[in-house]
Amino acid sequence: MSESTTTFSALGLPESIVSALTEVGYETPSPIQAACIPLLLSGHDLLGQAQTGTGKTAAFALPLLARLKSDAANPQVLVLAPTRELAIQVAEAFQKYAHHLPGFHVLPLYGGQSMVVQLRQLKRQPQVIVGTPGRIMDHIERGSLNLDGIAALVLDEADEMLRMGFIDDVEWILQHTPAGRQTALFSATMPEPIRRVAQRYLREPQEVKIRAATSTVATIRQRYCQVQGPMKLEVLTRVLEGEEDFEAAIIFVRTKTASVELTEKLEARGYAASALNGDMQQAMRERVIEQLKNGQLDIVVATDVAARGIDVPRISHVINYDIPYDTEAYVHRIGRTGRAGRQGTAILLVAPREMRMLKTIERATRQPIEPVVLPTREMVTERRIAQFRNQIMAAIREGSLDFFFDVVRGIETSEGISAREIAAALTFLAQRERPLQPEARDWAELPTPAPERPARANREQILTRRREVASGRLARYRLAVGRQDGVTPKDIVGALANEGGIDVSQIGQIHLFDVFSTVELPAGLDGETLSALGGLRVRSKSLRMRPYHEDGDSGFRPPRGAEGTTPRPPRDSDAPKRARRGSDDDAPRPRRWKTGSA
Ligand code: ADP
Ligand code: MG
């Protein structure tokens, strides 16, 4: 937030609210807050236009909280928000700001949640309701939401509600609330239909317009990396490794499929990642955001729609894996970082032919976009060692190592070796999954992007694989586990490599189908090997491996010549990408597992 000389008290907010703000760490009002709070406090209607991340929630929540009457039984404030996530976020903000208001209740109401639960919660006499238009209408029609006491109504992200087709519902709700209410409408843009709503339902509104982007973008360091499509993943992982202040990232892609596929690839490389896209059920999306907040996830691979409005202060990086369609989308995307006055980084992967877009963005945001310097192998080694050192120090700080001291001392005496030798061996063991020093062969020179053709290393890989399959060195085998069992390629590789003892280099492509999957392994595996591998379990189901015959097996047939990508059959669109759970203990096994033994 940019500098502002005023304070929350000076804007006329009561002490009870100001003290809650101090607790959440707000120092000064943001520009839109400074402009809106006095107006709303004095009862004006308001038309506010500002980009995301400018602090609109507090701009309306604080003054409306200050105006609550303590003796009313019915809801006094109604906020309409486009999505369930945003409704929850706004409700949480109200709750925080109202920390010192005794008996305060705020209730989010959205579709998908049980009516029974909501009806029960309504009985607790919430003063503030934050809801999505559809569900609010339901409650009004049922008579379960009494609007007689509504003194203020807020339309948050009005343009988004318009875009999602809610505008008629919003008008209907406006018509059902008391005519004497105070109304505030917030929107990032002011398309004509929104203006019309404002003209019809707001009374002599005061207009507040905060000039776009620049203030939001000021805390974000913008960078780019030129890269050709086939090398994107490699470049992405190197970029991630090279970032000093990395905490969590949102990676933007253009399609839902890409969000799932990239997530799988990152998970396979050991990242705690999850997809976030419009196909996922709301509850699942919320869980993902929650896990990103609490550190169970570090990376969310999202589409624009699904990531809109996300406010997770941990997000240190926004990566534009696929370039956004326009500068506005870009500004929205990078606004997911640099939240709450923190420093953030935005990195754009850009193909040579997209460089013009980069220039356009630079002009629009009035900020230079600097090139990323990819880390060298030595730098990565150094960073991994530093992380390892931190882990050790954390374990020491946490204490209760007595038992382990004894174990080490026992080994020292029985083997006649030094603690240092033991430590070196343990270090070796601890890094086998993810070598402290990246293997030289994993560290192929990244070709400087040349226009048009795929990068050479990649073409060679593709050709080699084609040759292997053609020469019969690899064959497809069928496994009796599929998407419906929740398996991922990583699970399968994990089972085959770790328990089945198959070298990862011998595992080819994996295709997931609903009820089964296929994996490429050396051709002609004998019956004994097959039954040994077939006895392995993934997600507590046995693999029951057998040679795969395309004609005899129903299901999707991967397109020819699609090597190098995992072709994806149409999938149950409601089966969301599983989020990784838990702590580091159950970290996904990286694919490079075996390399340590080489
Ligand atoms: P918008 O609705 O405009 O997108 P939000 O209301 O979601 O913005 O606020 C964006 C972020 O800024 C939130 O994390 C919020 O806690 C933080 N924030 C809002 N106002 C202030 C302030 N005055 N000082 C510091 N952080 C703030
Ligand atoms: Mg908002």
Image (tube, grey):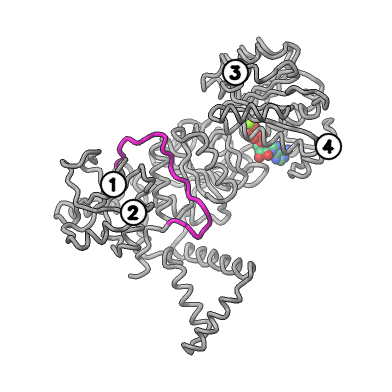
Establish whether ligand 1 lies closer than 8 Å to the Cβ of label 1: no
For residue 569: magenta? Answer: yes
Given the image, on which type of amino acid does mark 2 rest? Ile
Q: How far apart are marks 4 and 3 (CA)?
A: 33 Å
**Residue that mark 1 sits on:** 517
Given the image, on which type of amino acid does mark 3 rest? Met
Q: Which of marks 4 and 2 is nearer the N terminus?
A: 4
Give the numbered dot on residue 137. Answer: 3
4 vs 3, front mark: 3
Region of the chain picked out in magenta, as a range: 564-588
Which residue is depicted at the point 37% across and 65% down?
440
* Number of numbered markers: 4
1 vs 4, front mark: 1
Which residue is depicted at the point 31% across and 49% down?
455
Q: Quadrant of residue 473?
A: bottom left
Give the camera-side residue of 441 and 267: 267
Q: In the image, ligand 1 is in what quadrant?
A: top right
Label pair 1/2, CB-CB below 8 angstroms? yes
What x and y, as percent, mark residue 355? 43, 39
Magenta: predominant secondary structure element? loop
What x and y, as percent, mark residue 154? 68, 22
Q: Distance between the residues labelled 2 and 3?
A: 47 Å
